[in-house]
Structures are given as structure tokens and as C-alpha cells.
């Protein structure tokens, strides 16, 4: 049985309301060493912290996602900062920029991103970065900071962007999207990323890998991503699982 870490999941999602507890127990009995539940808003960050306190193998990330920034009150940062003192909180995230949907407020997103990057630096915690249709702004903001302790999540960029992210000192993580037939660009990116800089995630309940595409995703489906990376890197699935686990434990220092 493979043992692995799901570094990015959303078990607070209502799609898990019917079976969250049984599912988490079953996943942990079947190879999922740890799960990081990701905060997107203040409410969902609180849910992540509560889940992490309930389950020893679950950890939390806290923060405000760019799409949630417009609905988040001023003063949010002191709340996020309060959570950083909790030993089960391993990262600030997911934070970043998302220019996908029309009507986004670029200035607001950038302000939230910068404020939370500052907080991460102050608290010594790594960041989990979400960047969609915003590569240029994201990379410019990160580059101004020199080195960044963190991970670029659900990576969908080119091999060239991957190289730039690696230069910042960050890890790169992939979801089930890597298994999609049209994922040629992501496959090329995996080729240039050293195995010791890769991380695994589901982003569940979204991004279910083939052959489950469109279904509710859970952490067990990461084995498909492991197999795909093993195939690209020409190593065994065990090597992928073990190395990515070590990478995750190195980045999320509070994870045991
Ligand atoms: Ni996510």
C-alpha cells in the first residue's frame, strides 16, 4: 500500500457533508498519511482549523483566496494572524491572484496577496499560492521578494514558468488535471521539475483525475497523479510517493 500526503484539500466543502467523518477515517486507514485542509475565506479557515483539531492527521492552512477578497471585512488579517499561533496550522493559503472571471478587482486582490505574504514572512510559515490567468502579476510580486518559502498549487503553467517558480525556491504541486488528455503543457512542466521539488494534491472535491473526471474527488485518487508522475519521471510510484511526502514534510515544518 502506498503512503502519501494530500497537500491541498477542501473537506469543508458541502459535497462532503453527508460522509465527511467516515470518509476521512477510511482515507487515513488506506494510505493517506496527512491532509492539509485549505482555507479560502475566514469561515472556511475556521472550519479548517476545527477539522485539524478534530483529526490528528489533518492539518490546516488559513488565508483568504483572491475570489473571496471582495466579501472579506477589513481587519481580516488580525484573524488570520491569530490562527498562525495554532500548532496545527502549517501554512498561509490559499492566497494569490485569480483573473479568470470578469469583474475581478485587481488592486484588491494584489493588496490581499501582499498583506498575506507579509504575514507569512513575519510568522515564518510557508505560503500556498493560487494563480489563475495571472502568471505575470503573480511572478512579479513574488520575484520582488527574492526567495519565497511555499508551494505553487494546481500548477498549470509552462515549463518556463516552472523554472521561474523553482528559482524562487518554491515547490510545485499538481492535481488530477495532470492526468487529463489535454494536459500536455503540465506534462512538459513535470519533466523540468526535479523530483525533490514536487508535491501532490487533490484540490478535492474538484479536479478528479481520469478516469473519475467530473466526479467528486477525494484524497485516495492521488494515486492516479502518482502513477502519472512515475510514468513521466520513469521512476516507481513508491519513489514518487516517498519523495513528495518528504518534500511536503520539509516545507510544512509543523507537520508530524
Ligand atoms: Ni484549492
Image (cartoon, grey):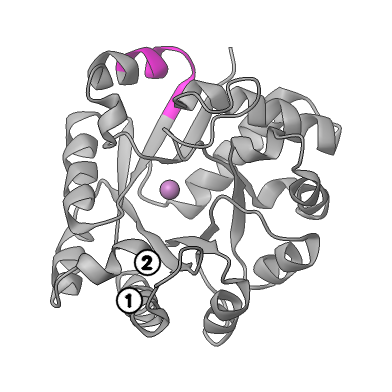
Point 31% across, 54% down: residue: 40
Residue 179 location, quadrant: top right
Q: Say above or below: 197 vs 106.
A: above
Per the image, label 1 sits on a secondary structure element best described as helix
Query: Label 2, label 1: how many angstroms apart (C-alpha)?
Result: 7 Å
Q: Is label 2 within 8 A of ligand 1 (CB to nearest ligand atom)?
A: no
- Can you name the residue that lies furthest to the right here? 234
- Residue 155, compared with residue 50, is above or below; it is below
Q: Residues within 10 Å of mark 2 (few under 14, many from 20)?
A: many
All told, the count of numbered labels is 2
For the N terminus, the image quarter is: top right
Q: Give residue 244's position: percent from left, percent from top.
A: 61, 40
Horizontally, is 18 left or right of 116 in the view? left
Q: Are marks 2 and 1 in contact (CB under 8 Å)?
A: yes
In the image, which disc is placed on residue 112?
Answer: 1
From the image, tell me which residue sits under label 2. Answer: 66
Ligand 1 has an atom within 8 Å of the beta carbon of the residue at disc 1? no
The residue drawn where x is 76% and y is 41% is 182
Amino acid at each position: 500500500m502506498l503512503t502519501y500526503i494530500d497537500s491541498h484539500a477542501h473537506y469543508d466543502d458541502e459535497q462532503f457533508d453527508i460522509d465527511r467523518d467516515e470518509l476521512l477515517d477510511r482515507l487515513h486507514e488506506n494510505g493517506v498519511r496527512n491532509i492539509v485542509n485549505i482555507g479560502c475565506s475566514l469561515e472556511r479557515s475556521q472550519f479548517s482549523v476545527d477539522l485539524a483539531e478534530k483529526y490528528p492527521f489533518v492539518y490546516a492552512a488559513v488565508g483568504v483566496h483572491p475570489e473571496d477578497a471582495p466579501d472579506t471585512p477589513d481587519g481580516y488579517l488580525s484573524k488570520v494572524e491569530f490562527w498562525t499561533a495554532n500548532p496545527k496550522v502549517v501554512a498561509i493559503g490559499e492566497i494569490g491572484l485569480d483573473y479568470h472571471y470578469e469583474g475581478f478587482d485587481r488592486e484588491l486582490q494584489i493588496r490581499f496577496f501582499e498583506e498575506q505574504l507579509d504575514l507569512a514572512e513575519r510568522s515564518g510559515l510557508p505560503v500556498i499560492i493560487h494563480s489563475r490567468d495571472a502568471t505575470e502579476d503573480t511572478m512579479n510580486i513574488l520575484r520582488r521578494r527574492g526567495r519565497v518559502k511555499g508551494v505553487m498549487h494546481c500548477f498549470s503553467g509552462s515549463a518556463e514558468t516552472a523554472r521561474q517558480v523553482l528559482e524562487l525556491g518554491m515547490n510545485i504541486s499538481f492535481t488530477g488535471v495532470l492526468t487529463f488528455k489535454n494536459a500536455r503543457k503540465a506534462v512538459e512542466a513535470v519533466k523540468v521539475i526535479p523530483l525533490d521539488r514536487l508535491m501532490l494534491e487533490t484540490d478535492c472535491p474538484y479536479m478528479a483525475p481520469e478516469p473519475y473526471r467530473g466526479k467528486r474527488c477525494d484524497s485516495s485518487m492521488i494515486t492516479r497523479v502518482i502513477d502519472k508522475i512515475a510514468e513521466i519521471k520513469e521512476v516507481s510510484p513508491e519513489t514518487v510517493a516517498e519523495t513528495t511526502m518528504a518534500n511536503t514534510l520539509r516545507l510544512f515544518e509543523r507537520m508530524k
